[in-house]
Image: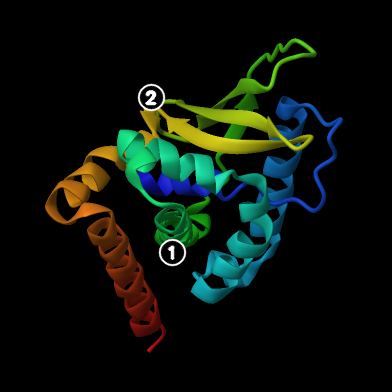
Amino acid sequence: MKKLLALFLAMFVTATVFAEEVPDVLVQRVTEEVLDIVRKDKDIQNGHTQKVMELVDKKVLPNFNFTRMTALALGKEWRKASPQQQQQLTAEFRTLLVRTYSNALTSYKNQKIVYKPFKMAPADTDVLVRTEVQQPGSKPVQLDYSLEKVDGSWKVYDVVVAGISLVTNYRDQFNQEVRNGGIDGLIAAIAAKNKSLESGAKADKK
């Protein structure tokens, strides 16, 4: 599930997102853009970790509201964190997602994306864009994007694959860390995980 979730998390590669671009058009446009890049880039297909991470860092992150994602993942404990702790948590969680999921782009095998009908009112600021991933030899997988309007642009704050939410998927783990070591303990745990993933990526290059 993580690989599939990551693959389509990483589809949000784009340059400037215009305020007038409605969410479903945004999702379809950037999905096709990133798939075109993956199809043509042999380095990504061959698992070039650093190149994939650079792609995610430069092109994916501007389209996500990581502060809200982190708050949702932490749940009620978020309000107990100081502003500095919230900033640290957001930075470490963003790094965790990038490091955990960058390799997923290399797993793309010409899956077909079907975009479901979408409706929204002009005043809407929080919407759901539904898509379906069709894979040869497998059942279709429902893939939903939750987006909110932030400063005139639409930002993704959750991705749901086959009914499993990205942010709530982390909630139990994060809450356990908070119970064991408080907010600072959670920050340390995520930072340690990030270092472990970084070391693993370096080892793979050898």
Residue on which the image places disc 2: 163
Residue 37 in view (yes/no) = yes
User: Residue at (72%, 28%) from the top-left corner?
Assistant: 23
Residue designated by label 1: 99
Q: Nearer the viewer, residue 182 or 95?
A: 182
Left or right: 21 as drawn, with respect to 136: right
Quadrant of the frame with the C terminus:
bottom left
Question: Mark 1 and mark 2: span between their CA atoms?
Answer: 23 Å
Whether residue 48 can be seen here? no
Residue drawn 32% across and 61% down? 187
Q: Give x and y (percent) for residue 171.
A: 29, 39
From this viewpoint, which residue is outermost toward the bottom?
206
Residue 42: quadrant of the picture = bottom right
Residue 187's mark?
Answer: none
- In the displayed structure, 189 sits above or below 36; it is below
The amino acid at mark 1 is Arg
Q: Quadrant of residue 197?
A: bottom left
Name the residue nearer the viewer: 37 or 78.
78
Mark 1, residues whose alpha carbon is within 10 Å: few (<14), some, or many (≥20)?
A: many
Mark toward the start of the polypeptide (1 vs 2): 1
For label 1, the SS is: helix
Dots 1 and 2: beta carbons under 8 Å?
A: no
Q: Which of these two is toward me, 31 or 179?
A: 179
The amino acid on which the numbered mark 2 sits, given as a three-letter code, is Gly
